[in-house]
């Protein structure tokens, strides 16, 4: 099957929009991850788990803005809360009770988070959490996972490779104070702490590696990270920007590890730009405006409309909703594993809770190097899925939203089965 020809046949308006966009936007897109070859699909509207494209097609959304839209699109309670608050004035340069309300919800759900600060993206959350770790420990070296994505500030771009490019623009002086270890490699972790343990501010960890393809932690890896950080007075920083949805208390609750600091993002602002970071009170006190040493400010920090959006989202995403979503995820993974096992191309599914990722390899997927997130075949997979009416990330990422049920999982399984067949005939 000629996947590209079929895609172009379905998306003439998107193609036109893209040509026009290229005149004003470098490369015609503003997010690296939304660009796909030959051009991305333009989406006009979204409701529940359905996207309406500029070409008039309806797509089932299994990407959910890279896990942000956990309640699906335009959930009525969130829309109401945000519009009501926005209409009463927004951007106030003064504290509002709405920030306290969202902070209280986070602190009540996540035992390791004693106090919390708000920012405008996951990038800002990890950036400020790392800054707090440096200020608190007096050390400047940062350890991270090879290939892990924590946003787009300098420190965390070290060790992120996109199709062979190593992030020009990141100063070499920053590279010198960041080290990486492969996910799930406990031996490498022990060696890294032997080498850098005395100089480390923090070890930043994705508890399930999202960017590398939803790879769960192997038993012992996070536990070893906790022990080594505690032994060396290094702060353990969990990036829960994606994983907070896995349990009311986040991945740290699901996997039973208590980090010192945690970064949040995605749905934490109910669909408005948001990030949050929090943790041990003695560390977070560096941000105390009266007595603290670290500057953290932002025109849109704790924006009231964002705060009520986040609170309404957390209220809807209670323990029951999460359990249902995780059960649906387990069903989807089980059924897709069977589909992958029968496919003519090598394919397997990784994931946990309401996340999964299709990898095109028969080898064990345990870290960023063994997954197949950026291979050409993965992009062709997403194109084949789109042609079949299902929207997934071009790296094979699939995640669920609360409006979904068994019929959507049926549609997903059918589309994956068909897409794998398309890939085997195209190969
Ligand atoms: N951390 C993780 C695990 C992420 O998946 C992302 C975004 O995809 C970020 C951090 C950065 O968040 P943002 O895109 O809001 O800056």
Image (cartoon, rainbow, N blue to C red):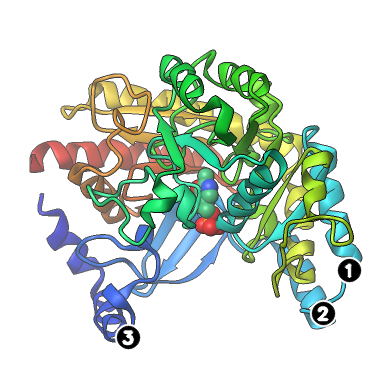
Q: Is residue 62 visible to the viewer in this orientation of the structure?
A: no
Which badge, 3 or 2, comes first in the chain's sequence? 3
Image check: 174 left or right of 78? left
Marks 3/2 in contact by CB < 8 Å: the verdict is: no
Write the residue at 69% across / 70% down.
298
Where is residue 221? Give x, y as percent. 52, 18
Q: Which residue position is annotated with label 1?
A: 96
Q: Which residue position is annotated with label 3?
A: 24
Q: Which residue position is annotated with label 2?
A: 92
Q: Nearer the viewer, residue 118 or 319?
A: 118
Which badge, 3 or 1, comes first in the chain's sequence? 3
- The quarter holding residue 28 reads bottom left
Q: Nearer the viewer, residue 283 or 114?
A: 283
Label 2 element class: loop
Write the residue at 36% across / 52% down.
172
Write the residue at 32% across / 43% down.
415
Q: Nearer the viewer, residue 69 or 30?
A: 30
Question: Measured along the vertical axis of the image, is residue 186 above or below residue 286?
Answer: above
- The quarter holding residue 255 reads top right
Q: Is residue 204 visible to the viewer in this orientation of the structure?
A: yes
Marks 1/2 in contact by CB < 8 Å: the verdict is: yes
Question: Measured along the vertical axis of the image, is residue 310 above or below residue 406?
Answer: below
- The quarter holding residue 22 reads bottom left
Image check: 264 left or right of 425? right
């Amino acid at each position: 099957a000629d996947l590209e020809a079929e895609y172009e046949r379905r998306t003439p308006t998107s193609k036109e929009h893209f040509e026009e966009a290229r005149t004003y936007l470098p490369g015609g897109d503003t997010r690296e991850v939304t660009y796909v070859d030959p051009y991305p699909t333009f989406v006009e509207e979204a409701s529940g788990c359905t996207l309406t494209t500029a070409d008039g097609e309806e797509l089932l959304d299994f990407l959910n803005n890279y896990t942000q839209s956990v309640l699906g699109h335009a959930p009525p309670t969130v829309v109401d809360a945000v519009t009501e608050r926005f209409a009463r004035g927004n951007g106030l340069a003064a504290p509002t009770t709405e920030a306290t309300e969202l902070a209280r919800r986070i602190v009540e759900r996540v035992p390791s988070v004693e106090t919390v600060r708000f920012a405008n993206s996951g990038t800002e959350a990890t950036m400020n959490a790392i800054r707090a770790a440096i200020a608190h420990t007096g050390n400047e070296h940062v350890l991270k996972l090879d290939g892990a994505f924590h946003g787009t500030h300098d420190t965390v771009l070290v060790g992120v490779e996109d199709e062979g490019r190593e992030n020009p623009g990141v100063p070499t002086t920053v590279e010198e104070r960041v080290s990486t270890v492969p996910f799930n490699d406990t031996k490498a972790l022990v060696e890294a702490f032997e080498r850098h343990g005395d100089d480390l501010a923090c070890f930043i960890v994705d508890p399930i590696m999202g960017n590398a393809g939803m790879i769960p932690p192997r038993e012992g890896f996070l536990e070893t990270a906790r022990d080594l950080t505690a032994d060396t007075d290094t702060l353990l920083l969990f990036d829960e920007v994606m994983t907070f949805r896995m349990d009311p208390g986040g991945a740290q609750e699901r996997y039973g590890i208590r980090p010192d600091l945690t970064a949040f993002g995605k749905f934490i602002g109910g669909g408005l730009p948001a990030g949050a970071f929090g943790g041990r009170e003695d560390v977070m006190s560096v941000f105390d405006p009266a007595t603290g040493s670290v500057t953290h400010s932002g025109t849109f920090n704790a924006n009231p409309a964002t705060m009520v959006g986040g609170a309404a989202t957390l209220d809807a995403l209670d323990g029951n909703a999460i359990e249902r979503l995780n059960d649906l995820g387990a069903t989807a993974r089980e059924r897709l594993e069977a589909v992958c096992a029968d496919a003519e191309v090598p394919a397997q599914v990784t994931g946990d809770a309401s996340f999964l990722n299709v990898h095109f390899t028969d080898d064990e997927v345990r870290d960023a190097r063994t997954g197949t997130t950026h291979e050409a075949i993965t992009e062709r997979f997403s194109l084949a899925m789109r042609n079949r009416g299902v929207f997934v990330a071009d790296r094979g990422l699939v995640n669920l939203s609360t409006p979904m049920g068994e019929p959507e999982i049926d549609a997903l399984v059918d589309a994956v089965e068909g897409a794998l067949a398309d890939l085997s005939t195209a190969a």
